[in-house]
């Protein structure tokens, strides 16, 4: 066995929950953990959860781009990590979203919805995103301090994606609550109470979109739900179930990760006053700044793939169907690729990163997330140039594979 796999001697390396945000050390000082793994066991076999954890930039890049690497839990081993996210994967009722589908189904579904997320379509949304941001900033005026996540970072992307889907204004709060519950599917160690809440929110969202789909069939509009139905009727072979699953995925993924991007980005600026001053003096740096925010504190920390056949990754044997969890956060801080990787520098010349994944499964909503962050953060700083962290310590979210804040009080 390759020496790059975990050695048993010496201090034990983290495994299981210790490689997720459920662990306090990983959650609060993630790169202390990831740097050690990259140095001692860059392909770390975590037998507790049944996956191999990859931390080197080049290994992560290779796995994400390999077309023989799959995501569908039904093609993984029975004891594999990805099965924890889909315990009913072998049942006839299993309804995977595009996130857990391989080609040809993945390519078909992505092709149908991709038009709404291409750079030209997203750029056309700029005025609406600016209007939403302005409305939220207006609501913050006159307050000495606010929870930045609740007041701005969370509602901004939620309203944007809800608008795209034609969700009524009065239902926005419901959708935020439902999506926060549904994303708990990524916590394989969730409590029975959390699972019950997650299932209830999934059903509530299904009920809403089932009714919406029926209404749009009768009276099509200009929203994304109507576009998905039109694509089906034009021969794209999108079933009712697929429309419903796609809407749920877009709403859930469309707000949680972008909330974390905005929250993490603002936190990085507020804890690096020289970089904040640099952005204030040259607002054109915002495009590069958002890329550095994505690299420095990735909203999604890892992404899994499993091979369609026995293969070797970075010199280590990986059996067919065994998940390789690519640590996007570790790849983004690999000193072999990035000079001074733990330094936050919005004028860094090379800000390429893996925060949106890679290969055929690269994040569909990346252009939208980037634009929301660029607009949202620029307008925030322009409106409240004296913004600073409050005395209350920010609270990180306890959710595997994601990195963001539950609460972050700022003074204005």
Image (tube, rainbow, N blue to C red):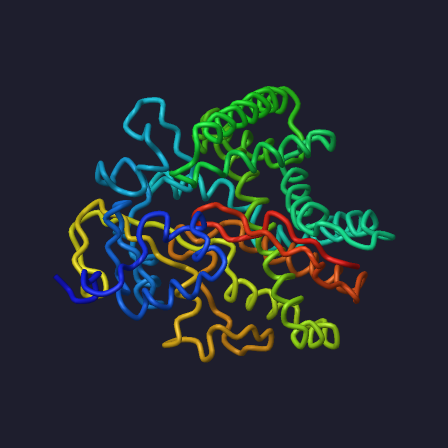
State the image quarter where residue 191 is shown: top left
Instruction: Write the residue at 56% across / 21% down.
Output: 207
For residue 53, side relative to residue 148 (left or right): left
User: For this rendering, which residue is in front, 201 or 40?
Assistant: 40
Q: Residue furthest front?
A: 11
The residue closer to the viewer here, 395 or 290, is: 395
Q: Nearer the viewer, residue 275 or 216?
A: 275
Residue drawn at x 65%, y 54% is 372
Q: Outermost residue toward the right?
A: 142
- Residue 91 position within the rendered picture, expressed as x and y whole percent measured from the top left: 30, 24
The residue sitting at 48% across, 28% down in the picture is 193
Please name the residue shown 59% across and 53% down the image: 369
271 to 126, vertically: above or below: below
Residue 241 percent location from the top left of the image: 46, 25
In the image, residue 159 sits, relative to residue 240, either above or below, namely below
Name the residue at the left extreme: 1
Number of numbered callouts drawn: 0
> Relative to 59, is 158 on the left or the right?
right
The N terminus, quarter of image? bottom left
Instruction: Please tell me in which quadrant of the rendered image residue 371 appears.
Output: bottom right
Q: Position of residue 361 (x, y in %)?
A: 40, 50
x, y percentage for residue 309?
Answer: 17, 49
């Amino acid at each position: 066995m390759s020496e790059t796999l975990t050695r048993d001697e010496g201090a034990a390396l983290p495994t299981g929950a210790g490689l997720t945000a459920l662990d306090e050390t990983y959650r609060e000082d993630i790169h202390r953990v990831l740097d050690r793994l990259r140095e001692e066991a860059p392909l770390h076999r975590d037998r507790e959860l049944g996956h191999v954890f990859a931390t080197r930039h080049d290994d992560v890049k290779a796995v994400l781009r390999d077309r023989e690497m799959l995501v569908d839990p039904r093609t993984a081993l029975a004891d594999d990590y990805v099965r924890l996210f889909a315990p009913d994967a072998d049942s006839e009722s299993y309804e995977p979203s595009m996130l857990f589908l391989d080609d040809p189904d993945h390519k078909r579904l992505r092709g149908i919805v991709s038009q709404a997320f291409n750079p030209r379509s997203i750029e056309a949304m700029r005025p609406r995103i600016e209007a939403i941001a302005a409305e939220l900033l207006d609501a913050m005026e006159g307050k000495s301090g606010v929870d930045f996540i609740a007041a701005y970072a969370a509602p901004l992307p939620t309203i944007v994606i809800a608008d795209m889907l034609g969700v009524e204004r009065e239902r926005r709060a419901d959708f935020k609550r439902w999506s926060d519950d549904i994303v708990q599917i990524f916590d394989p160690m969730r409590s029975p109470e959390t699972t019950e809440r997650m299932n209830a929110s999934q059903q509530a969202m299904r009920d809403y979109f089932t009714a919406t789909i029926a209404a749009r069939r009768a009276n099509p509009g200009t929203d994304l739900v109507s576009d998905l139905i039109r694509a089906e009727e034009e021969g794209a072979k999108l079933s009712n179930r697929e429309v419903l699953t796609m809407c749920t995925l877009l709403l859930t993924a469309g707000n949680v990760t972008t909330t974390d991007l905005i929250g993490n980005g603002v936190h990085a600026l507020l804890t690096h006053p020289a970089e904040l001053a640099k952005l204030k003096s040259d607002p054109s740096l915002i495009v590069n700044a958002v890329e550095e925010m994505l690299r420095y504190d990735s909203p999604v920390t890892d992404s899994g793939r499993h091979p369609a056949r026995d293969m070797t990754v970075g010199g280590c044997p990986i059996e067919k169907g065994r998940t390789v969890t690519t640590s996007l956060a570790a790849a983004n801080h690999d000193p072999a690729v990035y000079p001074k990787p733990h330094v936050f520098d919005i004028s860094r010349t090379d800000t390429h990163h893996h925060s949106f994944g890679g290969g055929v499964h690269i994040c569909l909503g990346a252009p939208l997330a980037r634009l929301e962050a660029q607009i949202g953060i620029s307008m925030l700083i322009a409106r409240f140039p004296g913004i600073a962290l409050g005395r209350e310590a920010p609270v990180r979210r306890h959710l595997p594979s994601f990195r963001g804040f539950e609460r972050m009080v700022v003074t204005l």
